[in-house]
Amino acid sequence: MVVFIFALLVFVPLNVNQIFGYGTVSTPTCDNEKPAKVVLYEPNHALLPKATGVGEVRLNWLKAERANKYTIGFGTSPRNYIYGVTNIPDTNNYTVKYLNPGTRYYFAVKAVNECMPGDWSREWSVLVGGTRATTFTHTGGSTSGEVIPTAIPTVIQKRQESGGNEIPTLIPTTEEQNQQPAVEDITPTPEPNFIQRFFNWLFGK
């Protein structure tokens, strides 16, 4: 009787853990390095390819270091991404379709390194027109250390991608960023006094 009770108290709980899955469960971890933050360009920028279909917005970004796929988040209010596209292959653009014309959407992109996601890019809002996206506005979301084009660059580098398509990538040069407008000398010339005007008249100056 004593042996039966001992077996009941010791062995039965162990078997219950194995049968029903009770006990300690390890939390999955990701050891991949976090990818860099994505630089998202202005949607519908004049120097970049843009969507032409109704209810479509093409997003262009600079590829992030240590990233092998990307995630797009978007919604109808700032930083509230209720819609999304995941597992986008290693590329620098994506066209979001089936958007409602006349609605403003807010977009952001994050890089992913296998199982490790990065931070969201800065956010851009786009008002979708009746034929295509017509206006855009920067809505914030920048953090320190992010490389962001601060002005419309005049240099476009053609990057050859697979399939033969050339995608322009905006690259502001150091010369453009440091260029300052010339300052003209606008110091006024002083007016001659009475004596100076007399001598000027006398000597015909």
Image (cartoon, rainbow, N blue to C red):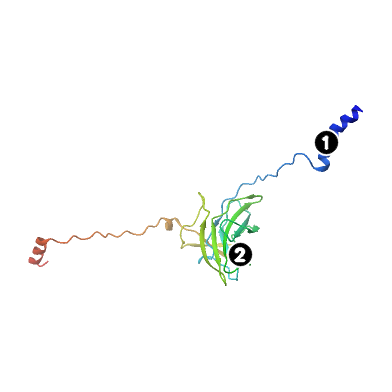
Say above or below: 46 vs 12. Answer: below
Inspect the image, locate mark 1, and give the three-letter code of the amino acid beneath it: Pro
Image coords of residue 51 (percent x, y): 58, 68
Residue at the farthest right position: 1
Name the quadrant containing residue 63. bottom right
Residue 13 is labelled as 1
Find disc 2 in the rendering and name its residue: 95
Inspect the image, locate mark 2, and give the three-letter code of the amino acid beneath it: Thr
Say above or below: 79 vs 33. Answer: below
- State the residue at coordinates (51%, 62%): 137
Camera-nearest label, 2 or 1: 1
Real-space Cα separation, disc 2 to disc 1, in angstroms? 56 Å
Residue at the farthest left position: 202
Q: In this view, does 203 lie to the left or right of 30?
A: left
Q: Earlier in the sequence, mark 2 or mark 1?
A: 1
Determine if residue 20 is in view.
yes
